[in-house]
Amino acid sequence: MPFIPHTPHETRAMLDAMGVNTLEELFDEIPPALLAKKLGFPGAALTEMEITQCLTERMKHSTPLLNFLGAGAYEHYIPAAVWDITSRGEFLTAYTPYQAEASQGTLQLLYEYQSMMTALTEMDVSNASLYDGASALAEAILMSVRLQKKNSILLPLTVSPFYRDTVHTLVKQQGITLLDLPFDKTGTIDKHALASIHTDDCAALVIPQPNFFGCLEDVNALTDWAQSKGILSIAQVNPLSLGLLSPPGNWGKHGADLACGEGQPLGIPVSSGGPYFGFLCCKKAYVRQMPGRIVGRTQDAEEKEGFVLTLQAREQHIRRAKATSNICTNQGLLVTAATIYMSLMGPSGLKYVASTCHHRTQQLLTKLTQIPGVEHVFSSPYFHEIVIRVPNSSALLKALSEKGIQAGLPLAPYYPNLENCLLLCATETKTEKDIADLHAAFLTVEAIALTQNHSGKNQ
């Protein structure tokens, strides 16, 4: 959305106060020969994102990377105000808010964050926060085991392999069994395999939405199935997608029991593998088993509003085996940025970004599948990621990388049956020109022609 800091009336008032007639008079010491006669921008007004992209393209010696990677870390546009405010000293250098009398600003912000996350997920309670999305899923699983006093977890293969590795690392020494659930040709959980599972010792079913392939699971049916078996449902979600998709609290007849995920899409930049923050929400009945900080709103003796850490003592996370969790810190600065981002965007802004992401991905899929030898792998609906199969993925990725294009994640290292399959993502930062450039690059790289010829000879 556009941002104009001063109205004509305000500009006129400032000029009058300085005793000058026009803005140009403020710079009259600059020789006329040095002044740009024309900047060459399009005639139509540009948004902040568009003007930033335009200036980046015009920078000398700049070769911006065209990025279609996703797989858990997403390139979204972050309004300049988000980190301008987040970087203020009050937020940037604030200490852990154990002393409420000295930390009301931080505590109120965390409370507002929790309120926004519960509104976004339609859950009763949110914490503030966890390390990242992967450890948040592990904590949700441990929480389910404590609540159910059962030791098996249904963990679909459609959950990110990176998350699955983290979960395995964090729970393998605690006697917890992770039961794989395969996926079918739609790219979603195989319900026939689910029906054959013995659920007597199952504590929870993890339901990714969207899943690692970008596909949309049948969350209502899965949530109701879990409830019918006495199993808790853990929604592992992309928070930005909830601007468009049904929130976990509305899944099925009674909603998911827990919701967790990665908060990076909410105003956190993709920067050399981080930073991240995880979120965890649940129904009110389970709040005493929730790890991480929880901020409450209260009144002091003079009936003035105040904010405090609640339900958990400062030491509760460092009591080893007796602790609810061994997490001893959180990602407070990133939560601050996410809170400011959600405040600026509002419900309509989040919906617009999510809708634009989906629309761009539709355009991407349509363009690429027009190329001979490129096919869409899964038949289910998707959000902003898709899986395509190409004749020779390694040769294609290498050729495109040399053109400055990151064209997706190869899936074969994680799913051997998906050889030559790529996971691609398109967010609101991808323009129609970007998609056309990728399409043109697909057509022109030698790898496509060579692999098509090779495929034809084999036939």
Image: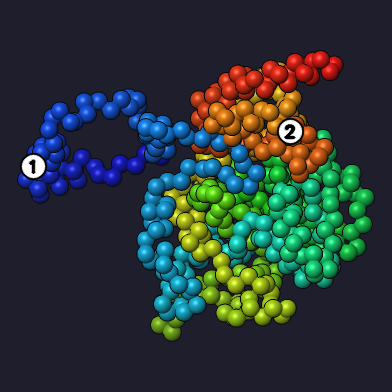
User: Does residue 198 appear in this view?
Assistant: yes
Which image quadrant is residue 407 in? top right
Provide residue 143's location: percent of width, then percent of height.
73, 67
Name the residue rendered at 73%, 64% in the picture.
Answer: 170
Provide residue 8's location: percent of width, then percent of height.
20, 40
Q: Is residue 1 above or below residue 457?
A: below
Q: Is residue 455 above or below residue 334?
A: above
Judging by the rendered image, the residue that carries numbered circle 1 is 20
Camera-side mark, 2 or 1: 2
Provide residue 59's location: percent of width, then percent of height.
37, 33
Q: Is residue 70 above or below residue 82?
A: above
Label 1 crowding class (10 Å Cα cut-off): few <14, some 14-19, many 20+? few
User: Which residue type carries mark 2?
Assistant: Cys
Name the element at disc 2.
Answer: strand
259 left or right of 79 in image? right
17 left or right of 454 in image? left
Query: How far apart are labels 2 and 1 at the CA level?
Result: 64 Å
Judging by the rendered image, the residue that carries numbered circle 2 is 421
Name the element at disc 1.
Answer: loop
Depth order, front residue of 238/68? 68
Direction left: furthest residue: 19
User: How many numbered dots are placed on residues in this image?
Assistant: 2
Name the residue rendered at 50%, 30% in the picture.
Answer: 431
Name the residue rendered at 59%, 35% in the picture.
Answer: 406
Depth order, front residue of 107/119? 107
Which image quadrant is residue 373 in? top right
- State the quadrant of the N terminus: top left
